[in-house]
Image (cartoon, rainbow, N blue to C red):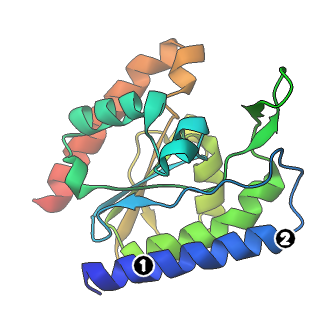
Amino acid sequence: MGMIDKEKCVAELFEEYKDAVLNAELPENAGGYSFVKGFGNATSSVVLVGEAPGKDEVLQGRPFVGQAGKILTHFLETAGLERDNLYITNIIKYRLAREGKRAGTLANRPASAKDIEFSAPYLKREIDIIAPKVVVTLGNVPLKGFTEVSGMTGINLKDHHGVLLEIPGESKSYLFPLYHPAGTIYRPELKTVYDADLVRLNEELARLNG
Ligand code: URA
């Protein structure tokens, strides 16, 4: 499939996902649902999967902008990737929201098992359309959802971060789990680990492309 067809398929899938979310019985989400679609090169050989969009992403309609944009810049530089050669998305494509402390404001809430379970099959279909060589998950939520729908068992972040794992299926493709970079703010000791994993990813990509 060429770029135009892939973009069309991803756009159709996003419309289907939005309808399905609005008709599903999901946990209470304050303020209704604000959706953010995957973004980038639909023919990319690398797909980056985050957890869910935040406030800035909803405002700008793109994943990983605002504060999280810094995360992305660091990711690209250390993994040796060009922004134009990346497709970036979130497993959950709506902001996970609860009422904020001040009236009328929203705060982020953690993903529930239901949110993950509901969105994971759509992520799988999105990735099947893009058909990248490597899927990079950021943090536990996309790792859990993606491995569950891909028939990969026994994978966890603690043991498998920074490790290239073959995804079962006909097309030879790989999963590369990373910690969520935002987690390194609360656990600074993870920053060194996260950066070393990115260097590993750079090496693995060079090897796969070589
Ligand atoms: N964090 C994520 O996991 N996804 C985004 O889109 C932004 C921040």
The answer to whether 105 appears left or right of 134 in the picture is right
Task: Find residue 155 and report its horizontal and vertical position in percent.
Answer: 60, 51
In the image shown, does 64 or 113 lie closer to the viewer?
64
Q: Which element type, helix, strand or loop, lies under badge 2?
A: loop
Q: Which element type, helix, strand or loop, lies under badge 1?
A: helix
- Residue type of the residue flagged with mark 2: Ala
- The residue lying at 22 percent from left, 56 percent from top is 85
Q: Name the residue under label 2.
A: 24
Above or below 52: residue 158: above
The answer to whether 7 appears left or right of 17 in the picture is left
- The residue lying at 16 percent from left, 54 percent from top is 207
- The quadrant of the rendering that contains the N terminus is bottom left
- The residue lying at 60 percent from left, 76 percent from top is 15
Point out the residue furthest to the front here.
104
Task: Find residue 185 and report its horizontal and vertical position in percent.
Answer: 53, 16
Whole-number angstrom distance, CA of label 2 to CA of label 1: 24 Å
- The quadrant of the rendering that contains the C terminus is bottom left
Q: Residue 149 carries which label?
A: none
Count the labels in the image.
2
In the image shown, does 183 or 102 lie closer to the viewer?
102
Above or below 204: residue 172: below
Point out the residue furthest to the top here.
188
Picture quarter containing residue 195? top left
Picture quarter containing residue 13? bottom right
Q: Which mark is residue 129?
A: 1
Which is nearer the N-term, disc 2 or disc 1? 2
Decide: few, some or many residues near mark 1? Use Cα within 10 Å; few <14, some 14-19, many ≥20: some
Above or below 176: residue 179: above
Q: Which of marks 2 and 1 is in front?
A: 2
Task: Find residue 97 and report its horizontal and vertical position in percent.
Answer: 76, 41
